Amino acid sequence: MQSMSPHPLKAIADAPQQVTLFTAQPTKTTLGCTTPWHRNGTEPLACLDVYVDNIIGLAQTEWLQHVTHWLALHNIDLMFQANHTDEITRKQPISESKLLKGDAQWSTTKTLLSWDVDATNGTMWLPAHQTQCLQSILHDTLAKWHQVASVTQNMVSPAGETAQHGGH
């Protein structure tokens, strides 16, 4: 393993920021990480989960937070070739503006893919307007499935067969 030299953007990533979460009623759900780094179940956990350009990290100790942060920052540079200091023709692969907003800070509460997540309480929720939109979509989808089930039931049980076995 290469030496753990600090990443040039680590100071920005660690700078304290104000985090603003939505005010909504949380919904209980299970939070999990698909690839924890532990061997026998007794060691502290750490993992990174990547979804497109969103990296979600979990670490149970300060040392694992440091290692996980280091791995994330340096591996982004390895994958996307960080700019040289004199190169200004393209954006850096790690957004300094997002770092300044606190996106790379360790916290038990975060907004991830529009969801507010509270890992301490094991809850996550959407803003009210998105919750209403999701409820509307689910209601419409459920109504369509009821319609499909009704049509399918009528296909399986023709009217003639129902009349014969209907007790008449």
Image (cartoon, grey):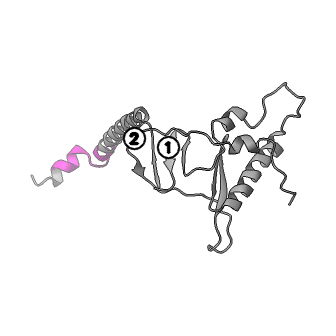
Residue 116: numbered disc: 1
133 left or right, relative to 12: left
Residue 24: numbered disc: 2
Q: Main secondary structure of the magenta part?
A: helix
Residue 89 locus on image (x, y percent): 84, 24
Residue at the image position 88 percent from the left and 28 percent from the top: 87
Residue placed most toward the observer, 5 or 47:
5
Between discs 1 and 2, the one toward the N terminus: 2
* Residue 120 among those drawn in magenta: no
Residue 103 locus on image (x, y percent): 63, 41
Picture quarter containing residue 17? top right
Classed neighbour count for the residue bearing mark 2: other residues with Cα under 10 Å, few (<14), some (14–19), many (≥20): few
Residue at the image position 81 percent from the left and 27 percent from the top: 90
Picture quarter containing residue 76? top right
Residue at the image position 75 percent from the left and 45 percent from the top: 10
Residue 48 locus on image (x, y percent): 67, 53
Residue placed most toward the observer, 22 or 37:
22
In the displayed structure, 162 sits above or below 127; it is below
Give the residue at the far left of this rendering: 168
Pointers 1 and 2 in contact (C-beta within 8 Å): yes
84 left or right, relative to 31: right
Element marked by disc 2: loop
In the displayed structure, 24 sits above or below 121; it is above
Provide the residue span drawn in magenta. Answer: 152-163
Tell me which amino acid carries mark 2.
Ala
Element marked by disc 1: strand
